[in-house]
Amino acid sequence: MRAIPHLAPPVSISSRAQTTKNFTLSRAIMSLELYAKAMTAYFGMYGVTMTTNPDLFWSEKGIMMMPYVKAFGAATTLPGFFARMTGLGFIIMVLGKHFGASDKTFSQQSVAFHVLSTKWFFGLATMTVGRRQPAMFTPWVWKLQVLVNIMLAVWGVQSLGGVKSAIKKD
């Protein structure tokens, strides 16, 4: 009679191996390369949509359902001009990365944007208007933008290796 081979018990990952696996995953998430790629997509998307047609994407009736303002209008209106110039600035940042800026330099620029613009975005999020004055900005969107800015700034600082590394010139 043939012996039936004994099945080995399921192998479990040791606690050290699990810790190493988690550490490797967190390092991958916090990598400078991943942050730079994410910010390229983030600024590129905003740049293209704000430069081409901000009303189509980011107004009260926009397809993104994130109405930063009631309406931007044509490039000759103040909000329309502002949106297009901001979009152009974002495109120039992304082009700088495309034409040779290092991941570190681009990430430092991205962190600088997120940190420095948070004060203004917070002002838009908490702005109050009088009863007879129409609200141009949508506060809940700007509150969300403040939260996103803080999260992206923290991610960027972590990816750069801390605050000292984030503000250090090469």
Image (cartoon, rainbow, N blue to C red):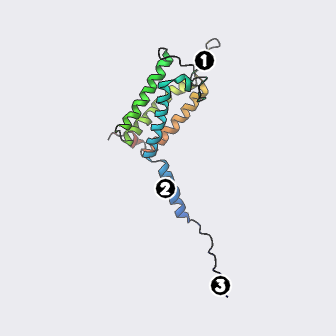
Seen at 39% across and 30% down, the residue is: 92
Mark 2: amino acid: Thr
The residue where tag 1 is placed is 135
Above-or-below relation of 130 to 50: above
Q: Position of residue 124 (x, y in %)?
A: 55, 23
Of the numbered discs 1 and 2, the one sitting upstream in the chain is: 2
Spatial distance from mark 2 to mark 3, Cα to Cα? 43 Å
Tags 3 and 1 touching, CB below 8 Å: no
Q: In this figure, which residue is indicated by the disc labeled 2?
A: 24
Question: Which quadrant: the C terminus?
Answer: top left
Which disc is residue 3 wearing?
Answer: 3
Tell me if mark 1 has few (under 14), some (14-19) or many (20+) residues whose alpha carbon lies within 10 angstroms of its own. Answer: some
Work out how far the residue at label 1 is from the one at label 2, CA to CA, in angstroms.
Answer: 47 Å
- Helix, strand or loop at label 1? It is loop
Earlier in the chain: of badge 3 and badge 1, it is: 3
- Foreground of the two, 6 or 102: 6
Q: Quadrant of residue 103?
A: top left
Q: Position of residue 162 (x, y in %)?
A: 43, 44
Q: Quadrant of residue 36?
A: top left
Three-letter residue code for mark 3: Ala
Q: Residues within 10 Å of mark 2 (few under 14, many from 20)?
A: few
Q: Quadrant of the N terminus?
A: bottom right
Give the farthest residue toward the front.
Answer: 1
